Amino acid sequence: MAGFSSLAPKTKNLVVAGGLSAFVFGVYFYTMRAVGGTDELQTAIDKFEQQKSKEESEATIPSKP
């Protein structure tokens, strides 16, 4: 990268920021592919909402005296 030092400071910052952003997105997509794309947080939220709706439906059913 011999020509990197001749660039303006703002241009250098943009080049570095672009490189870092590409690295971060690459690591993110690699990781998502490696774990199979499962989103554990979303799975936990869905499970919690199912349990909550089940409890609410049980609470709304009037019990026979």
Image (tube, helix red, strand yellow):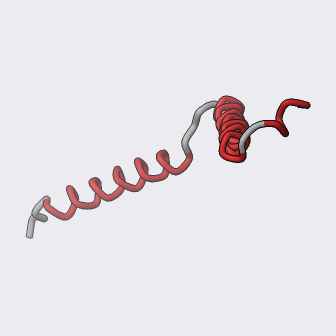
Q: Position of residue 22 (x, y in %)?
A: 68, 34
Residue with the most extreme bottom position:
65
Q: Observer-nearest residue: 57 or 8?
A: 8
Q: Which of 9 and 63 is in front in this view?
A: 9
Q: Residue at horizontal 13%, vertical 65%?
A: 63
Q: Look at the image and tell me in which quarter the N terminus lies.
A: top right
Give above or below for 27 relative to 42.
above
Lateral position of residue 27 relative to residue 59, left or right = right
Q: In which quarter of the image is residue 33?
A: top right
Residue 49 at what x, y percent from top left?
35, 53
Q: Is residue 12 left or right of residue 3?
A: left
Q: Where is residue 60 in the image (x, y as percent from the top left)?
A: 14, 61
Can you give x and y, in whole percent of width and height, for residue 51 in the image?
Answer: 36, 55
Q: Is residue 19 left or right of residue 36?
A: right
Q: Residue at x 65, y 32 (%)?
A: 29
Residue 64 lies in what quarter of the image?
A: bottom left
Residue, x 71% and y 37% (percent of image)? 15
Left or right of 38 in this view: 12: right
Residue that extends furthest to the right in the rendered view of this protein? 2
* Residue at screen point 47% across, 47% down: 42
Say which quadrant the C terminus sits in. bottom left
Count of all numbered marks drawn on residues in the image: 0
Is 33 rendered above or below residue 8? Answer: above
The quarter of the displayed image where residue 2 is located? top right
Q: Is residue 8 visible?
A: yes
Q: Tell me if residue 31 can be seen.
A: no
